[in-house]
Image (spheres, helix red, strand yellow):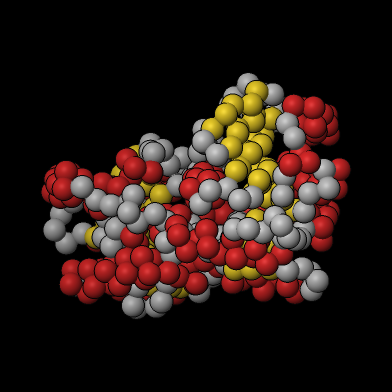
Amino acid sequence: MMKIAWLTENYPPSKGGMAQSCDRLVTQFRNRGHHVDLLHFTHRKPPFKTEAQVRGTYTALPKTNDMAHGLQLALNYVEHHLSPSDWDCLLVFGGLLPITAAPIYSKLWNTPMFICLRGNDFDLSLFNVKRRSALYDAITQSRGVFAVSHDKVRRVRTLFPEATVAYTPNGIDTEDWYKLQSEVHFAEQWRTGQIAENKKVIGIFGFLKEKKGVLFFLKALIKSGVQDRILLLFSGEQEEGIIAFLEQHHINYITLPFLDRIELIKYYLACDWVAIPSFYEGMPNVMLEAGALGKPVLATAIDGMKDVLEQHRTGLLFRPMDESDCAQCIYQITTMSSEQQQHMGNALAKEIKDHYSAEKEIDNYLCLLQELLPEPNNQL
């Protein structure tokens, strides 16, 4: 059994895919019998309070305007109220504060450090002068690096030849993620009330910001020439300008507020396709969630989407930043029969069940930890 210190900015009640992934992984580690002390930088809970949890603890740490001050306060609290000497490793999961703090904390606590590289923490930090040095420090001082896509594994190995990197894709607990008959009925009724028979519903879920490629996708939709045969279903916050563009170009759309992932199931089921047109990405939970429900995915051929999706078998992929290629994929969706679409969705559901389960996800993490942690701490 390991004792793990888990340092993150992404954990409930924070929203979004990173928080979901963090929660899922912590739960999986604890379910395997390991003790996880979660150290969460957050402004959503009062700081400096440690709560007992099953097989671990939760400690809220402050996010302050003065980052250095906040990290020093966090260090003092942990060293005087927790037991860093008991930890077998420090696992760093996302966010500027954890990545900045972890190399110092790891040395002071004499605790080997592992870093998880998901999406923005790596992609944007490479070209952000303020963040890059913290990222470089964290990777070079890590005992091991967990990377969520083969693209990220390749880039880390190229930039940091000495780093030990493992491919650790996201997973989904398919036994806990399934459709109820009531949700199927809701989806059928929703479609009956919202769309004409010849329209296809394409869902875009999550925080609809620039890096998610939403405006790019809308321009490709116009270029496809079939925008009158598409209804877009958005769920999540939209950046300014998205709605104005939709209205200006007379694109058919429906918007929903940000919904809990369980509430989204009935809307996934109402879609014919789910689109993920991100310019760069990790491995989106949305892709695994929609795919596990049997919905095919249209996505950019990058990162985790390229790892999971196979062209014309489990989804459609278009070249990054290629509007015409994306437009062609949208056109294909409108010409595809319901049988072809369902066959593709079923193939994706099987792919996810076979290769991207939550069990396989945690196995990937434990494999590298077992290999790199010294005896006797690697009794996994």
Residue 36, quarter of the rendered image: top right
| Farthest-out residue, front | 376
Q: Is residue 157 left or right of residue 276?
A: right
Q: Is residue 349 left or right of residue 159?
A: left
Give above or below for 274 relative to 155: above
Give above or below for 171 relative to 102: below
**Residue 246 percent coordinates (x, y):** 39, 48
Quadrant for the C terminus, please: bottom right
**Residue 231 percent coordinates (x, y):** 28, 54
Give above or below for 47 relative to 247: above
Look at 60% across and 65% down and name the residue there.
367
Residue 376, quarter of the rendered image: bottom right
Look at 34% across and 49% down and name the residue there.
176
Q: Nearer the viewer, residue 201 or 205?
A: 205
Q: Is residue 292 left or right of residue 377?
A: left
In the rendered picture of this protein, how many numbered marks are placed on residues? 0
Look at 66% across and 46% down and name the residue there.
4
Q: Nearer the viewer, residue 117 or 78?
A: 78
